[in-house]
Image (cartoon, rainbow, N blue to C red):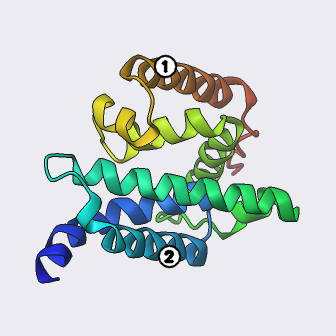
């Protein structure tokens, strides 16, 4: 068990970031990470020894997230813009807080497939091959989704974002 813990522990920050980016809720993200780890430990003997541990864990987490989304749809629970109110920027600068909200709002405009690939490659620094394993799609699909996601996010940030308040002296 110590061997498993030593392999899983370095993956926790990335799993936590990805869970929060998907759910935008601290408690929900913690629960998702815990569920991911429980499932990974329960199925540890079934994982491929020559496979990529990081990609395997992110695949488990994404599948659990999709289960959450399906449950929410069937129960009618929706997470909206009010979840952004809980976002706290590290800087005291109000403009950076608006920028953070704009980025998160822009991410929300992306499809789940585009958002996932952008977070996996751009934030979690997975290779295209690792992201393809997580998403269970060909590498070319990862590349095209990433290109479209970056383009849509760039367009949103340039044209669709909320107005930035200026300081008046």
Q: Which mark is residue 30?
A: 2
Residue 33 placement (x, y as % from top left): 45, 70
Reply above or below: 23 against 28: above
Towards the viewer: 39 or 20: 39
Reply above or below: 78 against 25: above
Tell me the element at label 1. helix
Q: Residue under circle 1?
A: 147
Residue 83 placement (x, y as % from top left): 72, 64
Towards the viewer: 108 or 101: 108
Towards the viewer: 91 or 85: 85
Label 1 CA crowd tier, 10 Å (few <14, some 14–19, many 20+): some
Q: Residue lying farthest right?
A: 76
Answer whether residue 38 is visible to the viewer in this image.
yes
What residue is rendered at 42% in x and 66% in y? 16
Alpha carbon of mark 2 to alpha carbon of mark 1: how far?
A: 30 Å
Reply above or below: 132 against 139: below
Label 2 CA crowd tier, 10 Å (few <14, some 14–19, many 20+): some
């Amino acid at each position: 068990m110590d061997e498993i813990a030593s392999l899983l522990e370095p993956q926790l920050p990335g799993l936590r970031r990805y869970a929060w980016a998907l759910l935008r809720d601290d408690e929900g993200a913690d629960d998702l990470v815990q569920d991911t780890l429980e499932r990974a430990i329960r199925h540890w003997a079934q994982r491929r020894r020559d496979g990529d541990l990081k990609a395997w864990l992110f695949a488990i987490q994404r599948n659990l997230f999709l289960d959450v989304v399906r449950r929410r749809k069937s129960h009618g629970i929706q997470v909206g813009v009010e979840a952004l109110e809980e976002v706290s920027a590290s800087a005291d600068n109000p403009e950076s807080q608006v920028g953070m909200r704009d980025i998160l709002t822009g991410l929300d405009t992306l499809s789940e497939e585009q958002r996932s690939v952008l977070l996996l490659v751009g934030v979690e620094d997975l290779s295209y091959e690792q992201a393809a394993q997580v998403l269970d799609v060909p590498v070319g699909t990862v590349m095209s989704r990433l290109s479209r996601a970056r383009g849509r996010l760039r367009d949103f940030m340039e044209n669709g974002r909320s107005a930035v308040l200026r300081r008046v002296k």
